[in-house]
């Protein structure tokens, strides 16, 4: 049995598809899980309840964390450490291996070009500090020798079928598809990597089923030579056949919007990811597994074909 905690999101869905290469026994866990593959086992659970988490992972060889809590620092502080403690305790008790799907919020902002698995952990944001705490919790259990785990990190992601968890979808693809101006944060003149979600799902499944991958941090396969925000908008505009119009929201404007829009209030501390080059290096994974990431041109074509035609 291989179990996905937080199975309904963009990554959990792609991971469920990819796991069929390795097992027929896939358990999807969330408050209201929906079947991805015909034989998936659906397991409704409150992941903040230790007893329910223990039941959810019982009998699992590998447990994957793809949970996404509400993008709110108060929610993150309250839920993420509690959830992680539940999962760690359950996996140790049940003897499950753990795969944590992570982001790059904990990295030092002065080392984002490029960033690889050895990039210093020095978060400046409140959300980054929460993520660093989670990594420390996992590392402590691994170093104690009671847990076999790995951490799989992704850049900001994009892909087909994403509703509201991708900045690129929300502010660029959706807007341009409707003839509106694309929106970008801070500056559209810096490079910004994006990980393609089908690649992320395949790679996470591969890591979870590769014994030698455990005990390590892995950057999931992501196309090299990322585009600037403006270049990405031009690429998407060309695919839609519309003018490449863009509105850039500088920090002061994001702060003002935050007075009226909760999501913008949460974005202020993360703007450093858009006011400098954000280049994600996944060469370790690419070389280890001979994996070719989807390039940006093909990724955008596939999204437009799947979601907008």
Image (spheres, rainbow, N blue to C red):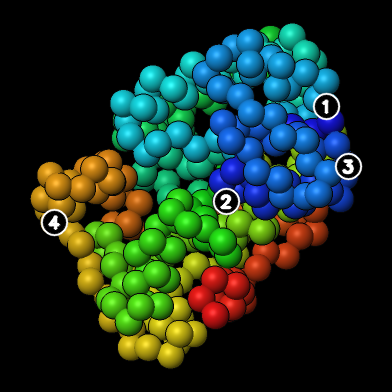
Above or below residue 236? Residue 90 is above
Which residue is more in the foreground, 153 or 107?
153
Which residue is more in the foreground, 38 or 229?
38
The answer for how far apart the CA atoms under marks 2 and 1 are is 23 Å
Q: Which residue is mark 1?
A: 61
The answer for how far apart the CA atoms under marks 3 and 2 are is 21 Å
Q: Secondary structure at mark 1?
A: loop
The disc label shown at residue 24, or none:
3
Residue 223, percent across and down? Answer: 60, 65
Above or below residue 208? Residue 283 is below
Q: Is residue 241 visible?
A: yes
The residue that appears at 33% across and 88% down in the rendered structure is: 243
* Residue 53, picture quadrant: top right
Of the numbered discs 3 and 4, the one sitting upstream in the chain is 3
Of the numbered discs 2 and 1, the one sitting upstream in the chain is 2
* Residue 97, picture quadrant: top right
Q: Secondary structure at mark 4?
A: helix
Residue 119, percent across and down? Answer: 51, 41
Q: Is residue 281 visible?
A: no
The residue that appears at 54% across and 80% down in the rendered structure is: 309
What crowding class fits label 2: few (fewer than 14 Cα within 10 Å), some (14-19), or many (20 or more)? many
The disc label shown at residue 10, or none:
2
In the rendered view, does 177 fall on the left or right side of 74? right
The disc label shown at residue 253, or none:
4
Find out whether the residues at labels 4 and 1 contact each other: C-beta distance under 8 Å. no
The answer for how far apart the CA atoms under marks 3 and 1 are is 13 Å
Q: Secondary structure at mark 2?
A: helix
Q: Secondary structure at mark 3?
A: loop
Of the numbered discs 4 and 1, the one sitting upstream in the chain is 1
Which one is in front in this view, the residue at disc 3 or the one at disc 4?
3
In the rendered view, does 168 fall on the left or right side of 260? right
What crowding class fits label 4: few (fewer than 14 Cα within 10 Å), some (14-19), or many (20 or more)? some
């Amino acid at each position: 049995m291989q179990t996905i905690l937080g199975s309904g999101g963009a990554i959990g869905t792609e991971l469920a598809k990819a796991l069929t290469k390795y097992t027929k026994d896939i358990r999807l866990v969330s408050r209201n899980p929906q079947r991805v593959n015909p034989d998936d086992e659906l397991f409704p659970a409150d992941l903040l309840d230790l007893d329910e988490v223990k039941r959810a992972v019982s009998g699992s060889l590998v447990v994957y964390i793809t949970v996404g809590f509400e993008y709110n620092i108060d929610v993150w502080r309250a839920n993420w450490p509690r959830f992680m403690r539940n999962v760690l305790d359950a996996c140790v008790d049940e003897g499950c291996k753990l795969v944590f799907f992570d982001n790059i919020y904990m990295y030092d902002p002065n080392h984002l070009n490029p960033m690889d698995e050895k990039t210093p952990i020095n978060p400046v944001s409140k959300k980054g500090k929460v993520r660093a705490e989670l990594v420390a919790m996992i590392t402590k259990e691994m170093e104690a020798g009671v847990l076999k785990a790995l951490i799989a990190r992704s850049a900001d992601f994009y892909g087909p079928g994403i509703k509201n968890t991708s900045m690129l979808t929300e502010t660029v693809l959706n807007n341009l598809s409707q003839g509106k101006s694309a929106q970008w944060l801070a500056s559209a003149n810096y490079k910004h990597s994006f990980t393609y979600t089908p690649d992320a799902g395949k790679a996470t499944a591969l890591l979870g089923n590769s014994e030698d991958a455990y005990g390590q941090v892995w950057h999931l396969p992501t196309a090299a030579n990322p585009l600037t925000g403006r270049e990405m908008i031009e690429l998407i505009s060309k695919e839609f056949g519309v003018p490449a119009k863009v509105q850039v929201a500088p920090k002061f404007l994001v702060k003002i919007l935050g007075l009226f829009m909760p999501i913008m209030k949460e974005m202020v501390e993360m703007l450093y990811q858009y006011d400098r080059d954000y280049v994600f290096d996944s060469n370790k994974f690419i070389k280890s597994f001979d994996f070719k990431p989807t390039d940006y041109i093909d990724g955008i074509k596939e999204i437009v074909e799947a979601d907008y035609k």
